[in-house]
Amino acid sequence: MRILLIAIFVFWSALVLLGQTFNNRYNFVPYTAGNGYSVEQKGDSLIIFSHYSDSLYKIGIHILNLNGEVLDSKVLFRDSTWFFVGYSNSSDKYHDGFISAGITRFPDPHRRGYMIKWDNQLDTVLTKSFESSTGDSSLFLYQAKALDDGFVAVGSKTNNNGIEKILLIRADSNLNEIWRKEYGNSTIPQAGYSVIQTLDGGYLIGGVRKIPDSWDHVVIKTNALGIQEDVAYFGSGYEGYIAHVALTSDGHYVFGGMKKTGDYEYQSMVCKLDGSLNEVWCNTYNSPGPECYVNSVKALADGSIIICGVDRSNWDMFGYVAKIDPIGNTIWYRKYSQTENNWCFFYDVIQTNDGGFFLTGSLYPEVGLTQDIWGIKLDDMGCLVPGCDTVQHVFSTDEGVGFSIFPNPTTQFINVYVSSPNPADHIAFELSDLQGRIVKTFSPTLFDTTYMIDVQDLPTGMYVLKMLRDGVMMRSEKIVKE
């Protein structure tokens, strides 16, 4: 019996470890603004590629363990030079380390693109800058991907006359340029933000065509030498944003972006395309709002698709992550927001080795504080608060909305998952100390949402979180701040 109990304990501990979650804001060095733009996992480490600003823009590389604790943090910069990470999902991993892309701005007015090879300890192995052959253009690189025999990066080139074209650069394993190709024309600016290698050895590029007041998604298919084979523009009803591309398990393609549905109303959108870039299906994934879009899209091994981005469907800025089945139906959709007037952005998502998900982005205050890098680990159902997919059935009653909290005890955030309410409910939460003094409050504006109460500034001790409906307390939970 004792052996059986030990085995059960070990098994349960393993399940808890596999399902662990965390939610942290990171201010690694004093700065005014930080953005986590790309995430990777290597073994038991989670890596965030970021940029942040003080007197200059710099690149940050931050290594976390599976509990979200910082193992190492490094900075890359050059004197008198702005150094940017490219954009969402700007990095990739390969057997010897990582590749990332970005932009530098030297004292001269022209920007240069770069690629950097990192080893598995996140030390730089090789840095290569790329510029216009004539020296009269700015060159931007937004994303780099590893290939079997080198690397590819996508971006744009803009000359002094304002003509911007999509740019694709193919490099060998030492970052020596093999070829570069430009796409577009001299009348409408275009930029590439996303690239993947296709099954036939060619490339799929996602980006934007910058028609005045009506940006369109653009998707380009090339052969292995970068020669354009097909191009598709998704405009009008798809107005407004960048196409982020991925290869699906059946060999087709998807892109994530944004669809305009009315005046100042947009929705996050994912479209599946066949091998000739014809639309198979297009679906939207949140209520209309002034800013709702996809920042990263990844195809998973089970045929499903994971996306993340920004949901501003009620004018507050939420980070969201959603899982979609192969025919475009929503499996689950999770929203995350800090309660203290922070705007929350997700820029990249990966599936972790335990089947869960790790995302990075930024927490941006409307007033005060700093714009910090955000790292959040979710379980395989997209939950930060374990069991968020079932909490409405566990806690909801005729008396009000259900909620659940995690972790408890806590040091940084009290994460409160708020389930679907009765439409007539007017819900508010109050956090009080043991003397009854209210120290934090918030009223949910969206439901089926996780709200993150920042308690770093509170003294250690015991607190009480109360849920009120129409001013009447319906439920309370004791919270320990360590």
Image: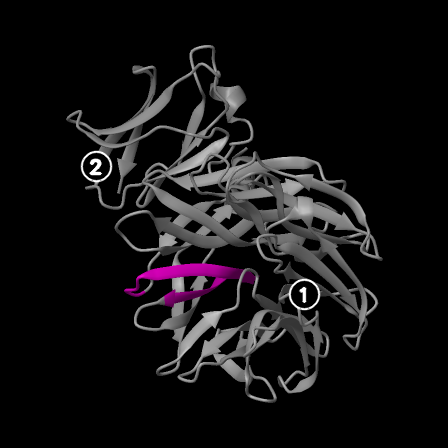
Q: Is residue 385 above or below residue 44?
A: above
Residue positioned most to the left = 435
* Residue drawn at point x = 35 percent, y = 36 percent: 408
Q: Position of residue 480 (x, y in %)?
A: 28, 35
Magenta highlight: main SS: strand
Residue 364 is one of the magenta-drawn residues: no
Q: Is residue 442 left or right of residue 360?
A: left
Marks 1, 2: nearer the viewer: 1
Q: Is residue 436 left or right of residue 31?
A: left
Quadrant of the rendering where the N terminus is positioned? top right
Which amino acid type corresponds to the residue marked 2 in the rendered image? Answer: Gly
Which amino acid type corresponds to the residue marked 1 in the rendered image? Answer: Val
Q: Are marks 1 and 2 in contact (CB under 8 Å)?
A: no
Q: Is residue 222 left or right of residue 176?
A: right
How many marks the image carries: the answer is 2
Q: Position of residue 204 (x, y in %)?
A: 74, 64
Q: Position of residue 128 (x, y in %)?
A: 55, 84
Q: Is residue 391 above or below residue 279?
A: above
In terms of secondary structure, where does tag 1 sit? strand
399, 35: nearer the viewer: 35
* Residue drawn at point x = 17 percent, y = 28 percent: 437
Q: Earlier in the sequence, mark 1 or mark 2?
A: 1
The local crowd at label 1, few if under 14, some if 14 to 19, many if 20 or more residues have their Cα within 10 Å, is many
In this figure, which residue is indicated by the disc labeled 2? 461
Query: What span is colored magenta in the figure?
Result: 29-52
Residue positioned most to the bottom = 134
Visible in this render: residue 44?
no
In terms of secondary structure, where does tag 2 sit? strand
Q: Which mark is residue 195?
A: 1
Q: Position of residue 175 (x, y in %)?
A: 62, 84
